[in-house]
């Protein structure tokens, strides 16, 4: 009772618990599922249609301005 509380069981040696934890971590790394392929250039709209993110959906709209207007209201 020196101020340190251990969450480990006194019946299982610390080195055995560490080994089990390392074994579980290695198993998780080796059995990891592959990352799914996601095409970020396509977006599915609410109605199910797919549009390209590389071009404008609303072709009648002008591109946003990249600079401030010099006119003051």
Image (cartoon, rainbow, N blue to C red):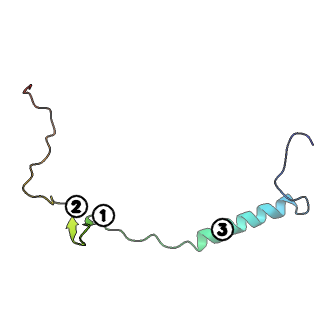
Between the C-alphas of marks 3 and 1, the distance is 31 Å
Q: Are marks 1 and 2 in contact (CB under 8 Å)?
A: yes
**Would residue 59 be found to the left or right of residue 4 on screen?**
left
Q: Mark 3 or mark 2: which is in front?
A: 2
Residue identified by numbered label 1: 40
Tell me the SS state at disc 1: loop
Q: Which quadrant would the C terminus be assigned to in this image? A: top left
Left or right: 35 in relation to 53: right
Q: Could you tell me which residue is drawn at 59 percent across and 74 percent down?
A: 31
Of the image marks 3 and 1, the number of the one nearer the N terminus: 3
Q: Is residue 35 above or below residue 60?
A: below
**What is the distance, in whole Å, between disc 3 and disc 2 at their CAs?**
39 Å
Which residue is the site of mark 3? 26
Q: Residue furthest top?
A: 72
Cα gap from disc 1 to disc 2, whole angstroms? 7 Å
Q: Measured from the top left, where is residue 10 in percent x and y?
A: 90, 58
Dot 3 surroundings within 10 Å: few (below 14), some, or many (20 or more)?
few
| Up-down relation of residue 57 to residue 34 (above or below) | above
**Residue occupying image coordinates x 60% and y 72%:** 30
Crowding at mark 2 (Cα within 10 Å: few <14, some 14-19, many 20+): few
The x, y position of residue 4, in whole percent, is 85, 43
| Residue at left offset 21%, top offset 72% | 49
For residue 38, which quarter of the picture? bottom left
Q: Quadrant of the N terminus?
A: top right
Q: Which residue bears the numbered disc 2? A: 53
Q: Considering depth in this image, is 7 or 45 the residue closer to the camera? A: 45
Which x, y percent locates residue 8? 83, 57
Element type at mark 2: loop
Q: Residues within 10 Å of mark 1 (few under 14, many from 20)?
A: few
The nearer-to-camera label among 3 and 1 is 1
Q: Is residue 73 above or below residue 14?
A: above
């Amino acid at each position: 009772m020196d101020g340190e509380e251990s969450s480990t069981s006194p019946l299982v040696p610390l080195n055995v618990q560490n080994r089990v934890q390392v074994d579980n971590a290695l198993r998780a790394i080796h059995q990891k599922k592959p990352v799914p392929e996601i095409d970020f250039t396509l977006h599915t709209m609410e109605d199910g249609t797919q549009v390209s993110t590389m071009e404008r959906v609303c072709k009648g709209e002008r591109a946003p301005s990249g600079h401030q207007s010099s006119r003051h209201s």
